[in-house]
Image (spheres, rainbow, N blue to C red):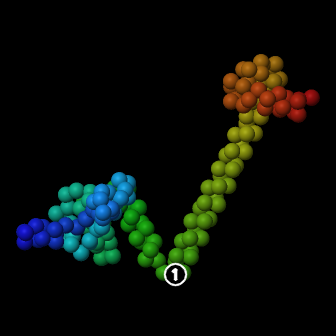
Amino acid sequence: MRKKFEEEKEEVIERVSLMWERTKTPFSKKMKFAFVELPRFRKTAEELETNVDRWLFTLKNLSRLKDRPALVQGKIFEKLFELAEIKQLTEENMKQYKKSVLDYYDVQDAMNYARKEGIEEGMKKVIQKCLQKNMLIEDIVFLTGYSKEQIIHYRMNNMQ
């Protein structure tokens, strides 16, 4: 019994399920919990073997790491370290960062809107040229992806 207790003492991740006391049956097959006890994780960077090891090591040591260990690589870890750096910004720098993010999204939105408008204008010119060449409406629908009703509406409102 003593050995089992010692082994349990070393477990870092404990999985827990709720159970009905009276019937000793699971409360839910879907609702489960995982408890992570980071102080119990004692591996060094050189001892990391699995992705779980890498995550536990990174989460436990994030505040102390100056550089990312070679074994802790990949896009998800890049994002984690980026977020950790952002979290360390001063209040003033955080305001500047948030403003720059909002500015970036404003520019992206403007570009996407302009692109959409440009595509719509280009399609109208294509429809106009097709109608000038007396192409069948079904062919214009096929070429542009617009509906027959949209083509007819465009012809009625834009052709003299």
> Which residue is pictured at 26% across the width and 72% down the height?
38
Residue 100, x across and y down, in percent: 58, 68
* Residue 160 versus residue 35 in the image, above or below: above
Numbered disc 1: secondary structure:
helix
Amino acid type indicated by mark 1: Glu
> Which residue is pictured at 70% across the width and 49% down the height?
114
Q: Residues within 10 Å of mark 1 (few under 14, many from 20)?
A: few
Q: Residue furthest front?
A: 22
Locate the C terminus and report the quarter of the image it occupies.
top right
Q: Residue furthest bottom?
A: 91
Is residue 17 visible in the rendered image? The answer is no
Q: Give whichever of 4, 71 is nearer the camera.
A: 4
* Residue 104 versus residue 37 in the image, above or below: above
* 14 sits left or right of 160 in the view: left
Residue 63, x across and y down, in percent: 33, 76
* Residue 92 versus residue 81 in the image, above or below: below
Q: Quadrant of residue 44?
A: bottom left
> Which residue is pictured at 32% across the width and 57% down the height?
26
Q: Residue furthest right?
A: 160
Q: Which residue is denoted by mark 1 in the rendering?
A: 91
> Which residue is pictured at 38% across the width and 66% down the height?
81
Residue 28, x across and y down, in percent: 37, 56
Is residue 139 visible in the rendered image? The answer is yes
Q: Quadrant of residue 10?
A: bottom left
* 96 sits left or right of 48 in the view: right
Q: Give whichever of 54, 100 is nearer the camera.
A: 54
